[in-house]
Amino acid sequence: MRHFSVELEELNQKLLQMGGLVESAIHRSVRSLIEQDRALAEAVIRDEPQINQIEIEIDGLATRLLALRQPVARDLRLLTAALKINTDLERIGDLAVHVAERSLSLMHHPLVKPMTDIPKMASLVQSMLLKCLDAFVQGDADLAHSVLLSDDEVDRLRDAVYGELLQIMQRDPTVLTAAIDLLFVARNLERIGDHATNIAEDVVFLVKGIDVRHHAKQGEAL
Amino acid sequence: MRHFSVELEELNQKLLQMGGLVESAIHRSVRSLIEQDRALAEAVIRDEPQINQIEIEIDGLATRLLALRQPVARDLRLLTAALKINTDLERIGDLAVHVAERSLSLMHHPLVKPMTDIPKMASLVQSMLLKCLDAFVQGDADLAHSVLLSDDEVDRLRDAVYGELLQIMQRDPTVLTAAIDLLFVARNLERIGDHATNIAEDVVFLVKGIDVRHHAKQGEAL
């Protein structure tokens, strides 16, 4: 039987691999939207089964380790955190696919607004995701905490996108369906930020044993 | 030390209690919307911390049982399923709060469409939730499977709501913000259906040891 630490390292590596795929999916789906690049959106949709496959592998590995190794204290928290983070990463992958699908739906439509806040939202949530995965690997609770603070900025950008789209829709009802697609893109990016926040909360719990969930959910109105 | 079976029963009871609270939150948030009843929406928002509290208790209990009892086979699957179902229930509670918030935002606005499909969606996802919780308690994989089949009907109703709202928005731009609120209500109900589907998949895995995730995610485009 291999050392437990080797198996935990394998689990970490798989989570990071999944994190990398998911981060690339966000990046490509938003670039596809901005640059009206059909191939990029199709690639995101085509690659999703790979993310789903790793999700199942991570679940299997974490559950097997729970059963065989009967861990306690931090190792137990690590395995339950891995199960939760795994679920959040898979949902983020789904959300990137939703963005790619909206991008395809918008492909032959002239862009309805100068695309500034949506790319900003995308960069921000990608950076939140990278930070919380870094925090997970390095056991860095402060870094995880910094992700929690970004949530307000995501909400601010979402409000800006919504306000601008609403004005555009009121001026020109012919762009309604395109504007609604973009509303949902903003909503999906916001939810990616929520999942990154969930992961950051799990990391704080993992490192400090303190549950920081349900502390700042007020901004989630939309 | 108490019998393990007693502790598992306590876990089951807590999950059912949480399921009941969440189901009531969906019911009241949609009734509040239909009947323009402010007090009902406010009650949903006020009661959410109770759901969050039980989520933390269930996580703590399941994690403690994993550590102390070192379960294998079905008991292990039961505890990891409990952790996942717990997360899904909490998210459903959040979504019911989002519906309640939309309901408040629509409170002084004349209803923009005859409310037929939204209540139908709400009834359907409530019934999916009840069925998958029943299936969990009774270890009934067939009942859980029946929930997976309802997902297409949820998507059909969502498309009907979207189509109707889009027509209304094109005819009358003054109802844009109200119609967008309703679009998001439909989206939230759809996501409640997705979470019920997740729970049903976990129940099938629990009972049969077969992973049925990622088999029918094509309908999730919106």
Image (spheres, coloured by chain):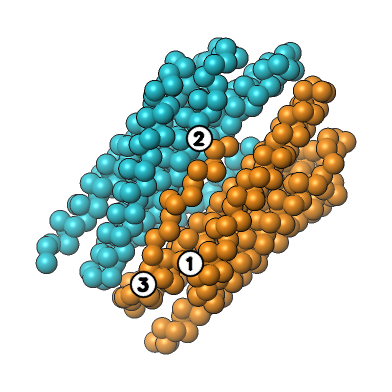
Chain colours: A orange, B cyan
Work out whether residue B140 can be spotted. Answer: no
Counting residues from the start of the chain, the first of labels 1 and 3 encountered is: 3
Disc 3 residue type (three-letter)? Leu
* Quadrant holding the C terminus of chain A: top right
Disc 2/disc 3 C-alpha distance (Å): 33 Å
Q: Is residue A162 left or right of residue B143?
A: right
Q: Circle 2 sits in a helix, a strand or a loop, which is it?
A: helix
Q: Amino acid at mark 1?
A: Val
Give the residue drawn at x 88%, y 36%.
Answer: A110
Q: Can you identify the residue that label 2 sits on?
A: B98
Amino acid carrying label 2: it is His
Other residues around mark 2 within 10 Å, as few (<14) / some (14–19) / many (≥20)? many
Residue B131 in the image, given as x and y percentages of width and height: 35, 36
Up/down of A144 relative to B52, above or below: below
The structure residue drawn at horizontal position 44% and vertical position 15%, both measured from the top left corner, is B35
* Residue on which the image places disc 1: A203
Q: Chain of mark 1?
A: A
Q: Which residue is mark 3?
A: A76
Q: Which chain is home to disc 2? A: B
